[in-house]
Amino acid sequence: MNLKRRAFPLQLKAAPDGEGRFTAYVSVFGTPDSYREIVAPTAFDASLAATAAAGRKIPICWQHNLAEPIGVWDSLTPDEKGLLGVGDLWLDVAPYARIAQRGMQAGCITGASIGYFVTGDSFNEAERVRTLTGIQLVEASIVTDPAHDDARIDVVKAKLAAGETPTEREFGKFLREKGFARSDADAIASVGFKAWAAGAGRSPQAKDPAISSLIEAAGGYSLPTI
């Protein structure tokens, strides 16, 4: 499985106090994102149960840096809106925790992003929407700009889901993530992809079985960070 990321504007219910305690949504349910994906309300249940059974808690990271957590999510609870977290920033030992605290208080740090594995999903061919029914949560980060992650991940999948044609460069990166050497990926993208893209204007592209199959194949994959 590939570790994926999902970013969105930080939705604070309570900004960090002087002790570094705050409340925010880690994920929102039932709303399609730019990749036409929806998180099911029960998607985190198995992961949260397994984490609790192991006596573990989910770390708060700064910009997805797992090597340097800045706090801990003391609780993560699904409600009618999403996965609501109560976080505790380690202000006394983690310098970036203090930056996150001040940034959230000032309103200049406005992003949340989770790192996760997909353990279950379904695809609605008619609506072209994928529902994530199982998510193994690894970490939940505070990020400076939620749009920054969105611009870097799942580019090929997003364009295919929208019935659009990815660029040759984007397709080459996708192949490299799947283990192709750079030279092989570039050769495939240059020759085979151009031949496929030449027919991508066929109407209606959004219902092309070949594209639908590629969306399904790409569903569990994400592009490497640029």
Image: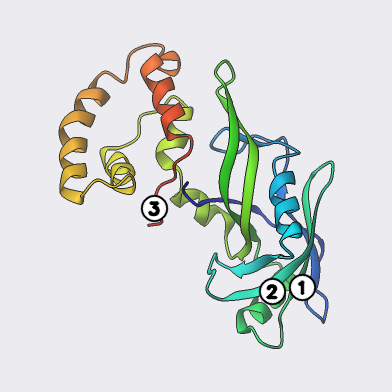
Foreground residue, 197 or 85?
85
Query: Which residue position holds label 2?
Result: 71
User: What is the quadrant of residue 196 in the picture?
Assistant: top left
> Which element carries disc 1, helix, strand or loop?
strand
Residue 14 in the image: state x and y as whole percent: 84, 64
Q: Nearer the viewer, residue 148 or 161?
A: 161
- Position of residue 115 relative to residue 212, above or below, is below
Q: Residue furthest top?
A: 203
- Classify mark 2: residues with Cα within 10 Å, few (<14), some (14-19) or many (20+): many
Residue ID for mark 1 = 88
At which x and y percent is residue 125?
Answer: 54, 18
For label 2, the SS is strand
- Residue 48: % across, % down: 73, 52
Q: Are marks 2 and 1 in contact (CB under 8 Å)?
A: yes
Label 2 sits on what residue type?
Answer: Gly
Assess disc 3: are there few (<14), some (14-19) or many (≥20) residues with their C-alpha within 10 Å of its C-alpha. Answer: some
